[in-house]
Image: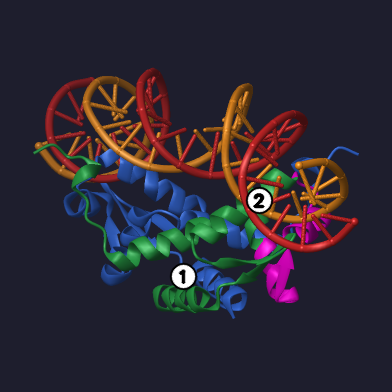
Chain colours: A blue, B green, C red, D orange
DNA sequence: ATTTCTAATCGCAAATATACGATTAGTATT
DNA sequence: AATACTAATCGTATATTTGCGATTAGAAAT
């Protein structure tokens, strides 16, 4: 049998943990989350003011954090307010905590 | 002034955390670390037996984990014994713990 | 309906990551 | 010196990520 990645079956915990870790694997996203945590919530525009990065790039990072479930967006027209997703944050905390002992 | 990534200055903690997180951002590497932790140490060959992945690919993952400082290799000719780098592991634990509260 | 504003998405280019097989390097042992 | 064994590295192909500017979408307010 050919030795190929297609045969791997990962444990669900490993997949979840890797997904969270991947989302945390960029310094900009770490600092976005730190900022978010400090302010409890914020708008995309706030981040554009704080970070010397293009608006589209920030939007992309937010999308990744959202996809990983670490943040959530709430419509506050004409803006969107982003907050930390506490439920998944807690899930991540538990996973990392258990993994790192 | 042009809004470009070159102007970003990251906090050292964010860089460290992102580096660890990036290394953890792949399920194979998570499971390698889990295995390593269970056995306390292991050889590359053990992993090749356990995971249905090419030897070169495993070696690559080990290299990344080593670069991130999460593991360390010890010459045990003709093999190399890999162990978790407890010092950096602890550092990562503290960083994640503080970050995730 | 039109305007205004914010944030997402598109399109592109460049850099990284992931996987593989093949080869090389390094270290005993013979 | 030659052999045997393990693990790293090379070379390559493909996929994903990261960044940007430009455009589009969505929701209020006029």
Left or right of residue A38: residue B86: right
Q: In the rendering, at what x and y percent does residue B45 appear? A: 78, 57
Q: In the rendering, at what x and y percent does residue B47 appear? A: 76, 58
Residues tagged by mark 1 and mark 2 found on one chain of the structure: no
Q: Residue at x 45, y 76 (%)?
A: B91
Residue A95 within the magenta-colored segment of the rendering: no
Return the residue nearer the eye: B47 or A46.
B47
Residue B61, can we see it? yes
What mark, if any, has residue A86 been given in the picture?
1
Q: In the rendering, at what x and y percent does residue A98 appear? A: 61, 77
Q: Chain of mark 2?
A: B
Bounds of the magenta segment: B31-54
Specify the quadrant that holds the C terminus of chain A.
Answer: bottom right
Return the residue nearer the eye: B29 or D17.
B29
Is A74 located above or below residue B11 in the figure? above
Q: Residue at x 17, y 51 (%)?
A: A49
- What residue did someone put label 2 on? B59
């Amino acid at each position: 049998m050919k030795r190929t990645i297609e045969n791997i079956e990962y444990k669900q915990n490993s997949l979840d943990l890797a997904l969270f870790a991947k989302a945390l694997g960029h310094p900009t996203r770490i600092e976005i989350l730190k900022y978010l945590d400090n302010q409890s919530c914020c708008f995309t525009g706030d981040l554009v003011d704080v970070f010397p990065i293009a608006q589209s790039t920030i939007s992309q990072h937010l999308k990744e954090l959202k996809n990983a479930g670490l943040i959530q967006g709430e419509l506050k027209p004409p803006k969107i307010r982003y907050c930390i997703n506490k439920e998944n944050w807690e899930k991540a905390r538990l996973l990392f905590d258990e993994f790192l002992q």
